Amino acid sequence: MIIVMREPIKQEDIDAVVEKLHSVGAEAHISRGQYKTIIGVIGDRETVMQIPFEAYAAVEAVVPIMKPFKMVSREFSPEPMTIRVGNTVIGPSTFTVIAGPCSVESEEQILEAARLAKMAGATIFRGGAYKPRSSPYAFQGLGEEGLKILAAAREQTGLPVVTEVLDPRDIDVVAEYADILQVGTRNMQNFLLLKELGRIRKPVFLKRGMSATIEEWLMAAEYVAKEGNHEIILCERGIRTFETATRNTLDISAVPVLKALSHLPVMIDPSHATGRRDLVEPLTRAGLAVGADGVMIEVHPNPSQALCDGPQSLNLQEFAALMKDLKTICPAFGREL
Ligand code: PEP
Ligand code: MN
């Protein structure tokens, strides 16, 4: 943060600002130019921002320049992070494919989907047991029963599973069955949920809020990291724009922007981003090209019968074709599939 002082300036005004900064443990670096006196502040942003410097008569402007996120920033850890889940590695040398249906509908559907996802080459399986539906009358998921079915799919295929947790009260039960806990777009700023997820020792798959800026998203990740859980995977899943051709707009530029700001792995979800199965493959390629560490794709044994998100789900043949395509192009980007 920079504090620009009003001219003409008196030494006692500078002293008052410096003293206040020192009282909260911050450092002040004074620079007296020909026309302006500027005080550079180093210290905890949250604490410093609490001080109402704008109300000081001698202060002309307060300019925040510090990044509000620390533990998830590149400065904190310059090397990109690698996260291991079972036999799967998420990080800079691999392109991780997470596949599976939107929701767990039955044991038969899940076991079939997991078996074929594995055969096609997916390395993590997904499926929602707790579904965040816009309508309270829509299918809400099978809950713990769904978690048990996911665990059975892992048992049969060896694929780790990721599933969404909606409510802090469900964290323990979800963590008992799942390998990675997902925070959906609608909960990206559920700070209570984020803090509680910071206390577990399983990776968190943090989707971008559909109206969240990249900075807000990284602050959400910071909530998790601050409590001690540093294994966070960011997933760009489309944001709301004026465009109606797709369900949301995949912000592909978020991937390299995040890579510059943070060491956390970044994935994309072209299924929820577009709502259209025909766009899943081209956007997966785009994600790979801009440096994403992987992709989350909705795959259903029978999309026309899906209880949720059928129009964006690939059937298993379509998914196998996409995997074949990725096998050819991943090496060009220095990534193992
Ligand atoms: C999901 O992955 O099942 C989901 C609901 O995604 P999002 O939170 O991105 O809408
Ligand atoms: Mn879905």
Image: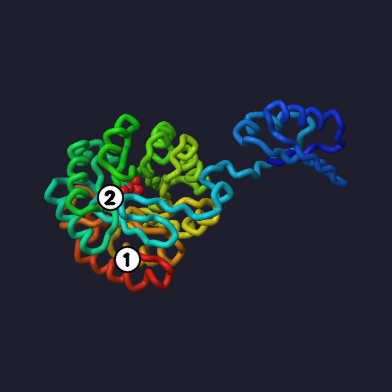
| Numbered circles on residues, count | 2
Q: From the image, which quarter does the C terminus lie in? A: bottom left
Residue 82 locus on image (x, y percent): 43, 53
- Colour pattern of the rendering: rainbow
Side of 88 where 242 appears, left or right: right
In the rendered image, which quarter is residue 44 located in? Answer: top right
Q: Nearer the viewer, residue 80 or 277?
A: 80
Q: What residue do we see at 86% from left, 35% from top?
A: 9
Residue at image coords 50%, 59%: 256
**Mark 2 Cα-neighbour bin, 10 Å: few <14, some 14–19, many ≥20:** many
Q: Secondary structure at mark 2?
A: loop
Q: Which residue is mark 1?
A: 281
- Mark 1: give few (<14), some (14-19) or many (20+) Cα within 10 Å: many
Residue nearest the observer in this picture, 98 or 283: 98
Amino acid on which disc 2 is placed: Pro
Q: Tell me the kind of residue under disc 1.
A: Glu
Q: Is residue 251 above or below residue 332?
A: above
Question: Regarding mark 1 in the picture, which secondary structure is present there?
Answer: helix
| Residue 136 seen in render | yes
On the question of residue 139 being in view, the answer is no
Horizontally, residue 180 falls left or right of residue 50, namely left
Foreground of the two, 147 or 131: 147
Residue 198, x across and y down, in percent: 42, 36
